Image: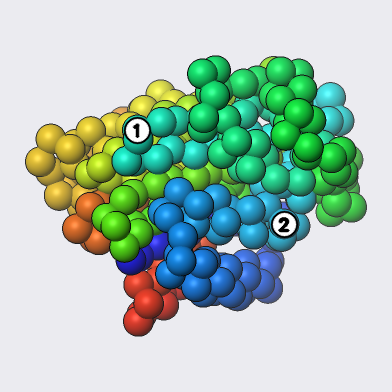
Amino acid sequence: MKLIIHGGFFSEYTQSEETKILKQTALKEIIQKSYQYLLLNSAMDTAVFAVALMEDDPLFNAGMGSQIQKDGKIRMSAAVMDGCTKRFSGVLNIESIQHPIHVAKSLQMESDRVLGGEGANVFAAKTGAPFFNVETIERRQEYQNRLISSGQGTVGCVVLDKEGRLAAATSTGGKGFELSGRISDSATVAGNYANDHCAISCTGVGEDIVSCALAAKIVTRVTDGQTIEEAFKKSFHELKVFDGFAGAIGIDAHGNMYHKESHPNIVYASFDGLELCVFQ
Ligand code: GLY
């Protein structure tokens, strides 16, 4: 049993060294709680559990603390993929929901599994999710100062459970100050993908991640026989061609964990029950 989580990039100009330490401390607590949860639960449920904890923490750009779009509204996206069933489900541009990742998970058993905008909100209401204001004073101030922070802060988790099942979950408040209607990578197979060989969650600039098909590409390479390290290196090399801005975490069916980023300033934590690592 192993898991790795990311709290996205932290901005070099809107946040301080202190924020980085706060984020690392938060990830440390979240990964330990999530590992305890994994002892009794599946990879899929644990990935959702970990991401929901990060959605609750306004330090991260997902759920509470999500960034504000150009028209002054917050729209969030989240997705899950169960490597065992190979089912992807997600929500795009959902509003006023505490846990977009729970709505994404609820779609797993539906025939229509990726919903956007109003449809996603109607579905969330049917699951009983109440209206929840995810805006914070800090995000409103950033918006008022017209700070665009390049997709920093998306959160994600990839897990291998005791049955050998893999799962990936990713949630984001987007780039900040983007046009209404813009689609994030997080609820696409470029940002979040898993099968029975590998599970990947990405963060960074959605446009770059989609252009590279990053998560699906790494998973496909591992499925076709590359090691997870080789698959990451080759895929990040391809991102370089257009100076793509991205980070990703991954785990394979043997429990090998890997992470890589195109630029510095991203926070990760991993735990296998013995060794807890926090990276930046
Ligand atoms: N990776 C998050 C976004 O670009 O919206």
Q: Residue at coordinates 24% horizontally, 60% vertically from top-left?
A: 256
State left or right for residue 230 relative to residue 115.
Answer: left
**Which quadrant of the view contains residue 277?**
bottom left
Name the residue rendered at 61%, 50% in the picture: 153
Disc 1 secondary structure class = loop
Which label lies toward us, 2 or 1?
Answer: 1
Query: Callout 1, which amino acid?
Result: Lys
Q: Position of residue 39 (x, y in %)?
A: 43, 69
Question: Mark 2 Cα within 10 Å, few/some/many (few <14, many 20+)?
Answer: some
Residue that label 1 marks: 86
In this picture, residue 62 sits left or right of residue 226? right
The image shows residue 214 at horizontal and vertical percentages of 36, 34
Residue positioned 56% across, 71% down in the render? 33
Q: Quadrant of the N terminus?
A: bottom left
User: At label 2, which amino acid type do we have?
Assistant: Asp
Residue 79 locus on image (x, y percent): 53, 36
Is residue 202 or residue 100 the one in the foreground?
100
User: Under 8 Å from ligand 1: the CB of mark 2?
Assistant: no
Determine whether 270 is above or below 198 in the image.
Answer: below
Residue where numbered disc 2 is placed: 56
Q: Which class describes the residues within 10 Å of circle 1: few (<14), some (14-19), or many (20+)?
A: some
Nearer to the camera, 179 or 34: 34
With 188 as the anchor, is 127 left or right in this view?
right
Mark 2 residue element: helix
Q: Position of residue 63 (x, y in %)?
A: 72, 46
